[in-house]
Amino acid sequence: MLSEAENLDNSPGVGAEPERRVRDRGATERAILAAAKSLLVQEGFQNFGINAVARRAGCDKQLIYRYYGGLDGLVEAIGADLGTWVRDRIPEDAGGMFMLTYGDLMERLALLLLDALRNDPLMRRILAWEVSENTEQVRRLSEARSKALALWLDRMRGSLAPPKGVDAAAVNAVVIAAIQHLVLSGAAGGQCAGLSLKTSKDWEKAATALKRLVRGVYG
Amino acid sequence: MLSEAENLDNSPGVGAEPERRVRDRGATERAILAAAKSLLVQEGFQNFGINAVARRAGCDKQLIYRYYGGLDGLVEAIGADLGTWVRDRIPEDAGGMFMLTYGDLMERLALLLLDALRNDPLMRRILAWEVSENTEQVRRLSEARSKALALWLDRMRGSLAPPKGVDAAAVNAVVIAAIQHLVLSGAAGGQCAGLSLKTSKDWEKAATALKRLVRGVYG
DNA sequence: CCCCGCTGTCACCAATCGGTGAGTAGCGGG
DNA sequence: CCCGCTACTCACCGATTGGTGACAGCGGGG
């Protein structure tokens, strides 16, 4: 019934339009990027598309093509933004870990990573995207995320050498895999392999088990 | 990969059409289910829809509504089919594990599960689906998969009791999480947390690390 | 001043989506 | 033989998708 002519009831007397969009390319670009990230966080990658991002950003999709060269470029911009992830998550007391053993260190890192991922919905979405698709898009994003994680681990680890006789790279990869899947599975379904992952008590159990595993290898 | 173009030249003189579709509801139902599973395996859950399944099954989508009540019912049928997963994967020598310690058992189970998942693309797709979406559809499927896994573990474990003093349920969940994420990540991107997961040598490294972790907790 | 360029909007495109109603085709029982 | 039941197909619906070309409005430089 609505003809688009009648839809124009933005009669100037009534509404104090809160945000009057001004002509500012930089601001629009930032708005688009923010909309893309929030959309990815809230809706997941299933419904992540040009139309949805433009709708959320409150602008025309044409601008996404113009400013980012399409969805691919926008995704790449999200990936580039992940570089800031590291800066935001290096605690100041990292120096306090100098005198720890490798086992102490890895235990702390495991728990820190667990918490960091639990509190980072964007990373979770990207992680889930990674294991679900293998397009060029997601490969680039995956690379950025992987690089950020590696950098973070490197900064946190410092110069502590792993013990001899164990393939620390492989063991750590397995531990990280466990952490990532626990977080993903918990966020998605509230459980993993029969272990409930809802309450903070549940997560404490998981963390304890994780600690035990790390301690088991690294002593 | 069949284009419908070649299907259009069913000129009666030329081709001996290998499959002449007969009127057989049961066969059609089976064809639809098989098409759904193969579609999920080959394309993933992104493009899993009524149209795609019908196209692959070579029948009208209306039949999917009639026989399965829509996509939801079809997904549920896939879930029901997972019950056969357990039957196919119980080795005959399960009895040979009776005299093992719990650590021996869990190490073997971990490696068996790793291989089983590596060779089961359907399970991988379902697993990735689980951590990516939280709709009713995927929740049902997830439940079926989880139940199948639990049953498998139960059958394999036998009546061996876990050691005291360690939350075996939590530890095993973490180990399973690690296995699942390793397999997902490896299948999707060929690596996980910097650890390459392409060649069988790569997977041996991962398996060794996994063994070490399990051994560390269960002795 | 006018004009050009940049920012933003709108209308439109073909394709595909899930979903439905109506009609066709073939087999089996009278 | 024919009739009816059932398996099956087709045509169409509105909505949404990614993508493009044309146009409007403001602003700064000649």
Image (cartoon, coloured by chain):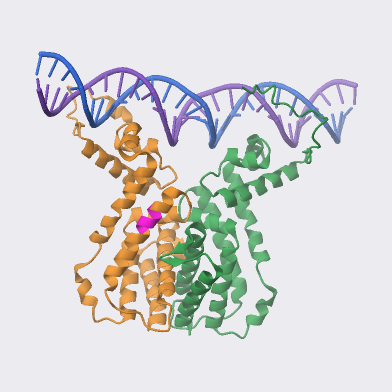
Chain colours: A green, B orange, C purple, D blue
Q: In percent of the image, x 44 and y 76: which residue is there?
A: A167
Q: Position of residue A72 (x, y in %)?
A: 57, 45
> Relative to C6, is A151 above or below?
below
Q: Is residue A199 toward the left or the right of residue B114 in the image?
A: right
User: Visible in this render: residue B118?
Assistant: no
Q: Is residue A112 toward the left or the right of residue B114 in the image?
A: right
Range of residues picked out in magenta: B141-145
Q: Quadrant of the N terminus of chain A?
A: top right
Compare residues D3 and B37 and report the one nearer the observer: D3
Chief secondary structure of the magenta span? helix
> Relative to C14, is B172 above or below?
below
* B64 falls in the magenta region: no
Q: In percent of the image, x 64 and y 23: which residue is there?
A: A2
Q: Position of residue A189 (x, y in %)?
A: 47, 58
Image quarter for residue B217? bottom left
User: Visible in this render: residue B61?
Assistant: yes
Image quarter for residue A194? bottom left
> Relative to A164, is B38 above or below?
above
Q: Is residue A181 toward the left or the right of residue B146 in the image?
A: right
Q: Position of residue A142 (x, y in %)?
A: 53, 56
Q: In percent of the image, x 55 and y 82: which residue is there?
A: A104
> Relative to A125, is A118 above or below?
below
Q: Position of residue A35 (x, y in %)?
A: 65, 46
Counting every numbered tag in the picture gives 0
Compare residues D1 and B58 and report the one nearer the observer: D1
